[in-house]
Image (spheres, grey):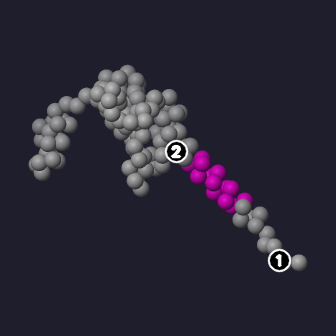
Amino acid sequence: MPYMADTTADTAGTEGTAGAAAKKQDRKAARLAKQIGAFAKEHGGAEGHLAHIGQAGTRIVLVGTDGAWGDLVAPAYETARLAAEKAGLTLHEEFDGEFAAKVETGPYEWTRMAGIQLGGPANRAA
């Protein structure tokens, strides 16, 4: 009769690790959802877009009803999606068209962008 290794201990450890990872992801998503909710409350509501940013994770771009915008970073796409779901955030597939037109930029953003593009100093005017 061939030898069969007992793998129950290995499986139990894996399930425990997976459960701990899921709990950690849920806690992170809950913290992000709280921040999304605070942004939405401050800006009369919000909509969002999820953008993969490589190894850093996923950026949650937020656009308030008043045109204000901001972002948060989640360690993974699934965490970002879960956070948006928990916060009741309406997500857009693309950041273009009508959604992008809702973003209002001011002098700070324009001088900051010009400084970066022209190799100028950091924003002094804002």
Residue that label 1 marks: 3
User: Is 41 contained in the magenta span?
Assistant: no
Between 40 and 96, the residue placed more toward the observer is 96
Q: Percent from the top left, x then y, of residue 18?
A: 63, 54
Identify the secondary structure beneath mark 1: loop
Q: Is residue 67 left or right of residue 51?
A: left
The N terminus lies in which quarter of the figure? bottom right
Q: Percent from the top left, x then y, of residue 116?
A: 17, 47
Residue that label 2 marks: 78
User: Is 18 contained in the magenta span?
Assistant: yes
Q: Residue drawn 63% across and 57% down?
A: 17
Seen in the picture, residue 76 relative to 96 is either above or below; the reply is: below
Q: Dot 2, how many residues are within 10 Å of its Cα: few (below 14), some (14-19), or many (20+)?
A: some
Q: Residue drawn 56% across and 43% down?
A: 26
Q: Residue drawn 78% across and 72% down?
A: 5
Residue 10 is drawn in which quadrant?
A: bottom right
Seen in the picture, residue 58 relative to 7 is either above or below; the reply is: above
Q: Are marks 1 and 2 in contact (CB under 8 Å)?
A: no
Identify the secondary structure beneath mark 2: helix
Q: Is residue 32 left or right of residue 10?
A: left
